[in-house]
Image (cartoon, rainbow, N blue to C red):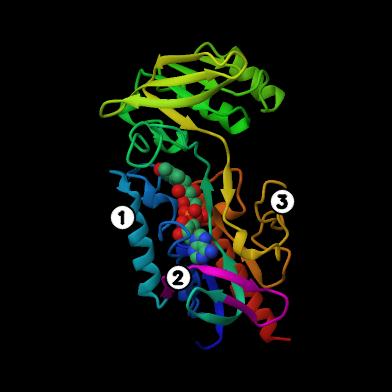
Amino acid sequence: MEDQNVIIIGSGPAAWTAAIYTARAKLKPLVFEGFYSGPAGGQLMTTTEVENFPGFPEGITGPDLMKRMKDQAIRFGTQVLTEDVKSCDFSKRPFVVFGSKHQVRTKSVIVATGATAKRLNVEGAREGEFWQRGVTACAVCDGAMPIFRNKELYVIGGGDTAVEEAIFLTRYGSKVFLVHRRDELRASKIMAQRAIKHPKIEVVWDSVLEGVQGDNVVTSVKLKNVKTNAIEQRPAGGVFFAIGHTPNTGFLDNQLELGSSGYVNVKPGSTITSVEGIFAAGDVFDSQYRQAITAAGSGCMAAIEVERWIAAQSHH
Ligand SMILES: Cc1cc2nc3c(=O)[nH]c(=O)nc-3n(C[C@H](O)[C@H](O)[C@H](O)COP(=O)(O)OP(=O)(O)OC[C@H]3O[C@@H](n4cnc5c(N)ncnc54)[C@H](O)[C@@H]3O)c2cc1C
């Protein structure tokens, strides 16, 4: 394959937005949309209704939204390879991207491989069981669904995100239980106090989720006290994992500087990584917001930064 201006790795909102912008800037982007790495189309392929993406007042399904983004990128000339990137060589320019079938040289790269929400592999919470039928990994995305209204909801985790999600869910559930495996929350003091003092939140200390039961939807959870080993079944209308995310950076083989939790480090307020000419967009660097619209926003930023960087290079 001929040398490229820009290769975009990934296929979520960040990747397609970067593709739309770089394609319209006549850079002819090449997207490696992935194959085994996760559903091509990213995390939204695993959800049904997306109700908070501006422009769709009636809501839109995740797969529909992603198809529209991809179609829009292709309309302006984006080329797409349906394969995973296995590794990259960022040690010299042009950079080389090694896909499972193609090996391509490029002036610049936008890494938009997203992150994977961690889930617990417990009985009843798996794909084909109650996953996406009352068990989810995103309270902000799914909390407002009717199935959770006035139910007892369980958030699994003990960090800031878990507390935030628990507080968010108090708007919908009759009561929110925060299940934490230790006797102290990992969240910051302020956040922990907010959870502990909240009239609708109860922390279930020293406990882990053992299983999820239900009929069409979740109706109960089984919790185990790790100190006494006692198992208790409790009525539940929903289970929300808030145990962190794993950014998809394995294929980078530590060629980009990563932060403590494995997110790609970028210069604040930009998408510039530790290697000149390599940019990062979306959940792969963003541990804070993790939404489709913010991923798309940083995809746009990366595209504009690539465009400026390539222009500056050709003036040298
Ligand atoms: C169940 C669920 C529901 C959600 N609902 C909402 C919602 O309603 N509203 C909202 O705003 N946000 C929602 N989110 C969050 C939103 O999906 C993410 O913030 C957003 O998708 C991040 O986009 P991204 O472009 O960074 O990457 P991702 O969507 O994570 O996509 C990255 C993709 O890149 C590909 N990839 C990974 N590695 C490689 C590789 N080595 N080579 C090639 N390709 C690769 C994979 O296909 C991967 O899926 C939800 C998330 C989940 C899990």
Is the CB of the residue bearing disc 2 within 8 angstroms of ligand 1?
yes
Crowding at label 2, few (<14), some or many (≥20) Cα neighbours within 10 Å?
A: many
Q: Is residue 181 left or right of residue 81?
A: right
| Residue pictured at 56% horizontal, 35% vertical | 243
User: Mark 1 to mark 2: distance in Å?
Assistant: 21 Å
Circle nearer the N terminus (1, 3)? 1
Q: Which residue is mark 2?
A: 83
Q: Which residue is mark 3?
A: 259
The quadrant where residue 272 appears? bottom right
Q: Which residue is mark 1?
A: 64
Circle nearer the N terminus (3, 2)? 2
On the question of residue 100 being in view, the answer is: yes
Q: Is residue 273 left or right of residue 28?
A: right
Which element carries disc 1, helix, strand or loop? helix
| Residue pictured at 63% horizontal, 30% vertical | 159
In the rendered view, tell whether residue 252 sits above or below residue 52: below
Crowding at label 1, few (<14), some or many (≥20) Cα neighbours within 10 Å?
A: some
In the rendered view, tell whether residue 205 sits above or below residue 132: above
Who is closer to the viewer here, 87 or 63? Answer: 87
Q: Which mark is residue 35?
A: none
Number of numbered discs on residues: 3
Who is closer to the viewer here, 269 or 128? Answer: 128
Which residue lies most toward the front here?
229
User: Mark 3 to mark 2: distance in Å?
Assistant: 27 Å
Q: Which residues are magenta?
A: 79-97
Percent of width and height locating residue 86: 56, 69
User: Mark 1 to mark 3: distance in Å?
Assistant: 33 Å
Who is closer to the viewer here, 254 or 285? Answer: 254
Is the CB of the residue bearing disc 3 within 8 angstroms of ligand 1?
no
Residue kind at label 1, given as amino acid type:
Asp
Membership of 279 in magenta stretch? no
